[in-house]
Structures are given as structure tokens and as C-alpha cells.
Amino acid sequence: MAKFENANLETGNAQKRSDDHQDEFFATRHSLAEYKLNESIIRSDYPEARPSADKQWFNSDLTPEGLKLAQEKAKEFFNRLDPAKDALFFVSSDLVRAAETAKIYLDEARARGFEIIKPREKAVAGNYRDKAEEIGEGNIRKIDSLTLDHLENMLQEFVFASNRDILKEVVKDTATVSGETRQKWREARQIIEADDKGSWGNNYAAHSAEIEKIFPAVKSAKAAYDTKFKDMMRLIRFGQQKINEQGPEKNIKVLAFSHENSFLHFLQENFGETMKNCESISFKVDPADGQGISATAKGRTVEVEK
């Protein structure tokens, strides 16, 4: 897992740093996307394949509406910050839709004169250069806990689709689907169709615990919370510790670009809502103990479970 110690945070002197610094970590969902990787898998001869970031052959996955939305939201986002006081560090999932959204925010930040903290160089494994680094031209660090590398079966993840039976309508030959999946699919779809919440995310938040009992490879929103979300919280605490040790003069704002899956349980439990495209959650570490984290979303602030 990439760590914040891989960032060049020497932007000031610890002795100069004021006591009222306002470091902050933002988790932002990617913009509206085409989901090219997902779609290519379920339309292939192997619709139950495991999605992998290194299989992405493209560097753009946002729709025209998604590009416009990201540009608008980036402008709104940076209206809250100050280039004279805030330095930015960009991290992302390695899926193109997240990294591409991060790059749009990065370009807007540069245009406004923000200091961008460049990740330190890292070794490239084999011939694969991760998409976050490639799209961000070396200015965006891939973080494992932000990506969706826990997905095991692409078709089964599509069981949550709203008003669309993927197995019937999209898979080109049901003979390419395992007998076990075909047998269980109808049972799973009956749960969704009996209480369709209108979107993949809403259905996942509402029904993933039931679906996980049918398809164990599909991790529930609670399981994603217990793994991915809590990993992010541990990394935020670690990041704040490293920031404090290096003592940059400016406030450090870490901008993380990810996916709704890992945040849905947290948002439903605390706010009763899901996560919109380009919506951000702000996290701050309690300076008193370095462990407590507060999260601000939907106009309210709550304490994150330790």
C-alpha cells in the first residue's frame, strides 16, 4: 500500500508551523462514467471474470456529462481553499474513472496556483505503470484502499442494476455463465426487483447483505466498510502523523478520488443517504489524540468509529 511518507511534504519548517493548522482529507467519488472495463467484461466470452486495473486499455472513461460535472465541481471545490495557505496532495483509485476525475481537479488546482505536492518516484512493476500515475503525469499517487480490487466476479456485481436484468439483456450467451450463477441469479434478482431503489448504489446499500448470502463473492456494504473504509481511516491517521512529523508551513489538503462502494454503509448509517458523483466527504484527525476522526458530509459533521 502506498503511504503518505512517499510524498514530498517538506514545504516548510516545523518550527514555523502555526498551532491552528487545518489539515484535511477529502474523499471524492468519481464523476459520471461509461464503465468501459465493466461493460467489456460482461459483454465478453467471460462475463464472470475478475476486473483488474491492468486490463484497462483506455485513459478516458467519463461521459461528456461527466467531464462537465467534474469541471464544475472542481471549481466549486477550490473556491473553499486558498493557494496562499493550502498545499495539495492527490491520491486515487487506479481505475480510470477515478484517476481521470482526479486529473480534472488537479488541472483546476494548477490553474489557480495551488502548490501540488508531488509523490516520490517509485519502482514500476514489470511493464505496467498504474493509471493514476500515468493519467496524473506523476502527480497522483495510487492508493490501494481507494480502489475496487476486492471485486471477484463482474457479472455478479451487476445483480444490483436498477430496472435492467444484465444476465438477460446484456450477456451475449448465457452458456458462458456458470450453472451456479445462473441458478442463483433469479433468486438474487427477485430481491432487487421487489424493492428496486432506483440505482446501483441505492440497491447495493439496501440489499447487499442479502445478496452476499446468495453470492459470497459479492461483499456487502458492511463488509466493504469493515475493510476498505477502515483501511482508509487508518491511512488518514498515518498520513496526519507524517504531516505532523514533517511540519509543513501550509495546511495539507489530501484529495482522494474513489468509488461509492466503500462509503455507502458509513453514509447510510450516519446520514441515511448514498454518495453522488463528485460528492466529497471531509475527514479531520483530532489533534488531541491523533486517533479520533470527524467526517463532514451532507452538511453535517459526525464522529467516525475508531
Image: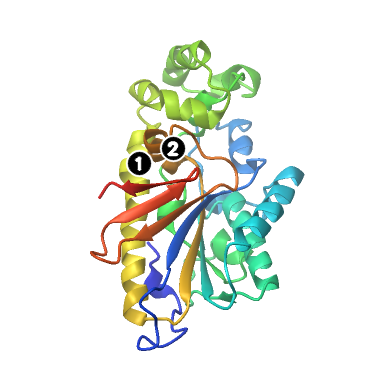
Crowdedness near tag 1: few (<14), some (14–19) or many (≥20) residues, C-alpha within 10 Å: some
| Snapshot quadrant of residue 108 | bottom right
Viewer-nearest residue: 302 or 65: 302
Q: What's the distance in space between the residues labelled 1 and 2, CA to CA?
A: 8 Å
Q: In the rendering, at what x and y percent does residue 144 appear?
A: 42, 56
**The N terminus is located in which quarter?**
bottom left
Q: In the rendering, at what x and y percent does residue 297 appear?
A: 47, 46
Label annotation for residue 292: none
Residue designated by label 1: 225
| Snapshot quadrant of residue 107 | bottom right
Q: In the rendering, at what x and y percent does residue 306 appear?
A: 25, 50
Residue designated by label 2: 264
**Could you tell which of marks 1 and 2 lies nearer the N-terminus?**
1
Labels in figure, total: 2
Furthest-left residue in view? 289
Crowdedness near tag 2: few (<14), some (14–19) or many (≥20) residues, C-alpha within 10 Å: many
- Label 1 SS: helix
- Label 2 SS: helix
